[in-house]
Amino acid sequence: MMQPTSHRRRVLLRSLLAASAGVPLVSMAQSIPVLSEADLAHAVTLRDAGLKTSLAYDLMASLVREVGPRPAGSPGDAMAVAWAQSHLRRLGFANVRADPVPLTVWQRGATTVEVTAPEKRAVVAVALGNTVGTAEPGIEAEIAWYPDFQALRADSSDKARGRIVFIDQKMDRSRDGSGYGRAVLARVAGAVEAARRGALAVAIRSIGTDRDQIAHTGAMRYDPQVAQIPAVAVGVPDADWMAERVAAGQALRMRVHMARVPQLRAVTHNVIGEVPGTDLAKEVVLLGAHLDTWDITPGAQDDASGVGIVMAAAKVLLDAGRQPRRTVRVVLFGNEENGFDGARDYGQRYQAQPHQLLGESDFGADRIWRFRARMRPEAQPVIDAMSRVLAPLGIEADGQPGNPSPDASVLMRMRNWPAVELTQDGTRYFDVHHTVNDTVERVDPSSMPQNVAAWAAVAWLAAQAGVAFGPIELTR
């Protein structure tokens, strides 16, 4: 005798979700399940399909090799916007468009840095984003050395006055990127703190974990109430060479020259493609990445990999043949690197549209190891179901709210939209972050399908859930 259909489906689901056997998959307090057994089974099907596709790597390599560096507002950026629209249409996405985003573009001036005493040495260095240039013929002065940013911030003496401050902030290698969080203030706020103490310029040890003779760029910010001084990052080997001489009691002098280049008004774009929904089509599950890079880098891991991952994840949904209830929207943001103009424009443009979930891939190309969510308490059954579907991929849920990647984080705080964090392994990411070495060859193609599998499953479950995930209260 054939078993009843409902029983057969439960048996199939237990088989597909072996790791979650015996755990309820619906909210028993509701008359309507927050997720059907068919939807849970389909999430596993999508997960497994994601593991079999190389599309994310192929898209990443195409973007890097066909476009290259793509700073916001540049010709490379325009090429990337055209590339994204073309590939989204080719892959079958609906409502493909490019929303214009006006912005002010900082431009890099030619930069040279050298130690002039106690001996001459050319230094590998790069201007930090948003820095002002120097007057001719540059700035030469004795170095005021600080072991880290906190030492500079705590200094109430005249040590920095009339000198070039050097912040020797070392960055720790970490899986979750916490080493970057501890070190990056030296880059972002070092010029302001140095200027408050009368410094002429600031130089920092590159915020990175490599030992290569390269320098890492990235954004810094000025305080309108404080004088604007030039800011550069120095490669780690040269920073080590300088530190050895300081430790030996030698006084160092440095010369910094940076051409002054005016800022420009320009336009970048958020590129969007969709998997249209059915009965809840006006609600959005957002899968994001950012299209732009710094001008000195091909940006394979930051963030062509994320672009490839979210496009491939949504393509898995398209190819599976089941239309989601909510619209799954791929958003490739403009100017994440230097101002989040794309995220802010998106938050204004779509503020009236309900967003069920925000997610973003912007931490390289290595495997995801952790899942965190910020949703209303009523969504806990869905969070639990997501955790169980992700567990066979080696992804753990620690119950903490976490934070999504930067553009999604901006939107979460602007609109109180719910979000997820799928944390990639960042152990190697900061070896190449914001450098010339962020190339296709440094990406491991074997790790990207796991990312695609995770995002496809999470997007589907969010789109199908019978409970609203937000709005949320940001208390932590």
Image: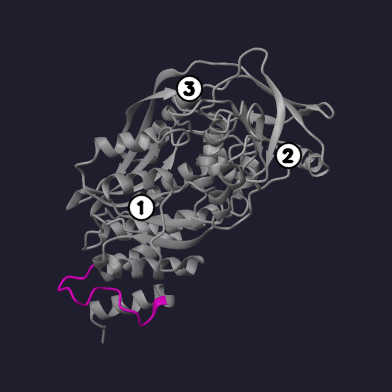
Question: Which of the two residues, 401 or 91, is positioned nearer the viewer here?
Answer: 401
Question: Which of the two residues, 337 or 361, is positioned nearer the viewer here?
Answer: 337
In magenta stretch: residue 31: yes
Mark closer to the chain start, 1 or 3: 3
Residue 76 x %, y %: 50, 25
Residue 79, relative to residue 25: is it above or below?
above
Give the Cα separation between the discs numbered 3 and 2.
32 Å
The residue indicated by pointer 1 is: 317
* Amino acid carrying mark 2 in the image: Ala
Q: Are marks 3 and 2 in contact (CB under 8 Å)?
A: no
Q: Residues within 10 Å of mark 1 (few under 14, many from 20)?
A: many
Q: Secondary structure at mark 2?
A: helix
Question: Which of the two residues, 438 or 96, is positioned nearer the viewer here?
Answer: 438
The residue indicated by pointer 3 is: 74
Q: Secondary structure at mark 1?
A: helix
Give the Cα separation between the discs numbered 1 and 3.
33 Å
In this picture, residue 114 sits left or right of residue 280: right
Residue segment shown in magenta: 20-34
Q: Main secondary structure of the magenta part?
A: loop
The part of the image, by quadrant, that contains residue 185 is top right
Q: Residues within 10 Å of mark 3 (few under 14, many from 20)?
A: some
Question: Which of the two residues, 351 or 8, is positioned nearer the viewer here?
Answer: 351
The residue indicated by pointer 2 is: 239
Residue 381 x %, y %: 29, 70
- Foreground mark, 3 or 2, reads 2
Q: Secondary structure at mark 3?
A: loop
Q: Residue furthest front?
A: 157
* Amino acid carrying mark 3 in the image: Ser
Q: Residue furthest left?
A: 31
* Amino acid carrying mark 1 in the image: Leu
Residue 230 x %, y %: 58, 25
Mark closer to the chain start, 3 or 2: 3
